[in-house]
Amino acid sequence: MTAAPIETPPANGGPIETDIAIIGAGPIGLFAVFELGLLDLKCHLIDILDRAGGQCTELYPEKPIYDIPGLPIVTGQELVNRLMEQIRPFDPQFHFGEMATSLEKLADGRWKLKTDASTEIIAPVVVVAAGAGSFQPKRPPVPGIEQFENTGDGVGVHYAVRKMETFRGKNILIAGGGDSALDWVINLAPLAKSMTLVHHRDGFRAAAHSVNQMRELEKEGKVKFHVASVKALHGEGGKLSGVTLAGADKSEWHHEADTFLPFFGLTIKLGPIAEFGINLHENLIPVDTARFESQTPGIFAIGDINSYTGKLKLILSGFHEAALMAQAAFHVCKPNEKLRFQYTTSSSNLQKKLGVS
């Protein structure tokens, strides 16, 4: 296999030639850029979202994470911001709002990856860091809900909380019984004009401490809870003014709300990756734990998308996988070069790359 050029700009809109094509710009994909950059491997990242961060920024940007080594507490957005700062010296190229649609093996052994925006990337290594696929919130079966979705200013129907301050002073209705619903009841209650939680039963799938916190807020009069479901939305011009709630006894009543946050779980779709010809097991990519390479040479999988004995779906596990993947990917990209293992703490060469020497 011939090595790819370090970075070849496309001529006249032609294919981009680089070392590594990464599908997914979540925390694991971002950290992979760092590990690959230390080895002088250039990366292009493709992500269906309009920004970096994956689940961290899409689902819980302000939710605290407690198990990142060296960071006792960090929000999803803060973690992504730190990762973006860490990889800045390596100048990764992002293709946001694009979905990887096809993967083709070329005669010279490299791969051609195409997106739905007609972007073509040629690289000897493709790294799938797509989490569990594309996450899409489950829409409640409420007629006409589309007209109220994501209308801005914290009003209407929202499936994620990107910035808590947006919802300050709103009459908020949250529906759901899982961790996301309970967490946002607790976190948004201090900001809301009123906070109401509805669930179809008086029992929850959330962590016990979250349920206890919600119950305490209910006792203090800061949260109202109803065993009920949302039957209809009311408002004009996309601006929500209230909803119709139906209780367990089929009784219905009007509830004032200008913000509706339904947390009914997520639909995970692997998308076109399933058609790439990569061996899959239950929509996951089996890998070996020495290289984190799939059964297709040159295609690696890191993070929640992969599968192996003892797998833990943790961000910190994905970081470890990215480090080992990078070492193996180097030999694919530069088969005629010797890899010299170095520590960032003692290598002046690595420190120069990072701009800290």
Image (tube, helix red, strand yellow):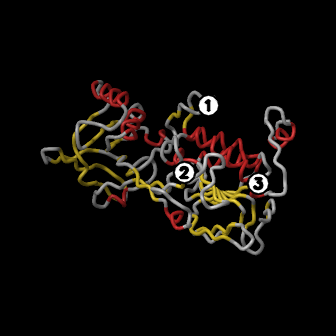
Label 1 sits on a secondary structure element that is: loop
* 22 vs 277: above or below: above
Q: Earlier in the sequence, mark 1 or mark 2?
A: 1
Label 3 vs 1, first from the N-terminus: 1
Calculate the distance from the C-alpha at mark 3 to the C-alpha at mark 1.
Answer: 29 Å
Q: Is residue 7 left or right of residue 78?
A: right
Residue that appears at 35% across and 27% down: 213
Residue that label 2 marks:
306
Residue type at mark 3 is His
Indicate the quadrant where residue 31 lies: top right
Label 2 residue SS: strand
Q: Amino acid at mark 2?
A: Asn
Camera-side residue: 121 or 237? 121
Name the mark nearer the viewer: 1 or 2: 2
Residue pictured at 28% horizontal, 49% vertical: 242
Give whichever of 141, 309 is nearer the camera: 309
The x and y percentages for residue 108 are 75, 71
Where disc 3 sits, the SS reads helix
Residue denoted by label 1: 69
Point out the tag, 3 or 2, that comes first from the N-terminus.
Answer: 2
Which amino acid type is shown beneath numbered disc 1?
Answer: Pro
The residue wearing badge 3 is 331
Q: Is residue 179 above or below residue 335?
A: above
